[in-house]
Amino acid sequence: MTTHSKSPVVGIDLGGTKALAGVVEANGTVRSRVYLPSRDLKGRPSELLDRIAEGAGTAASEADLPFNAIQAVGLCVPGPLDRTRSVVAMAPNLGWIDLAVREQLERRLPGKSVFLENDVRAAALGEHRLGAGRGYSSMLAVFVGSGVGGGMVVDGELFHGDHGGAGEIGHMVVRAGGPRCGCGRAGCLEAMAARDAVGRYVIADVARGHKTLLTDILQGDLLAFTSRDLAQAVAQHDAVAIRAARRSARYTGLAIGSVVNLVDPAIVVVGGGIAEALGQPYVGWAAEIARRQILSSARDVPIVPSQLRDDAGLLGAALTAFAGQDGN
Ligand SMILES: [Zn+2]
């Protein structure tokens, strides 16, 4: 890696509600942060790409840099890419299907190279280079929030697989014949561990007559609860909340154990809204289950919380641009 001598890039973390654009230096220093709405332009890709291109320029001026000092832009998107990482195959939150984002953004940003990455894979890259996975040659990252996603680093580089889909740990089946997943299949980790699943565990427990603080917090609408509500209830030793959170962690741990046996990473990083709101207890519960599955040679693999949190996407997008310039 020769990134230390590189000029800064613009990273853009694009989500279904908003985008965050910022100038990032090769050492991970964020020099500017510009928030752009995205929800109002759902299904209007051309206008949203106009706004993103303009936002890249604003990020440079907020960092007191002339825009021509920026040679590369990294963008992470909430959806799968094609195998060349030039086209966003599908981003339901943005209303995008088969959109040639790389080409369309480069047309709006003359002289700059644009590099794309899936948001979860970008977050994994960020954790590997600048977060909890720093210094390890290989890593598995798992993010548990409103969905479950992951990413793998092999020999120091993000592993994309032959079709670009590597790292989709959320759609590993952890319970045969289990509940329906957003992907249309049944019993995926996402259907057993993501926020909606935790909400279902709480509802089922309440239906069995158990009392929970979450009923007050949510005034009856249990599926509307946030990761923070859950964390708050767990911190107050709410038995229903703890059971629900542990159940999510159990399935996350089962999936981690299986993947560790398969690929033997040097470290496992656990993040995402649910895991981060609950912190070390969640990671500890998942690790305990995982270690029961892991064969003896890899049983001591570190299983640790993520570190980058809200900046994971922005930093991952910027690192995608740096890696792209290196030809990776
Ligand atoms: Zn699924």
Image (cartoon, grey):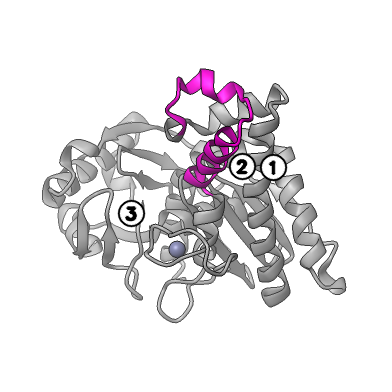
Tell me how far mark 2 sits from mark 1, CA to CA. 6 Å
Q: Which residue is mark 3?
A: 71
Q: Which residue is mark 1?
A: 282
At x 80% / y 61%, what residue is drawn? 291
Residue 66 image point, x, y percent: 29, 39
Q: Quadrant of residue 86?
A: bottom left
Residue 35 image point, x, y percent: 32, 32
Tell me how far mark 2 sits from mark 3, CA to CA. 36 Å
What SS does tag 2 mark? helix
What amino acid type should be assigned to the residue bearing mark 2? Answer: Ala
Residue contact at pointers 2 and 1, CB within 8 angstroms:
yes
At x 55% / y 40%, what residue is drawn? 204
Left or right, residue 194 beside residue 297: left
Q: Quadrant of ligand 1?
A: bottom left
| Residue range of the region highlighted in magenta in the rendering | 194-222
Left or right, residue 321 beside residue 47: right
Q: Residues within 10 Å of mark 1 (few under 14, many from 20)?
A: many
* Mark 2 or mark 3: whose residue is earlier in sequence: 3
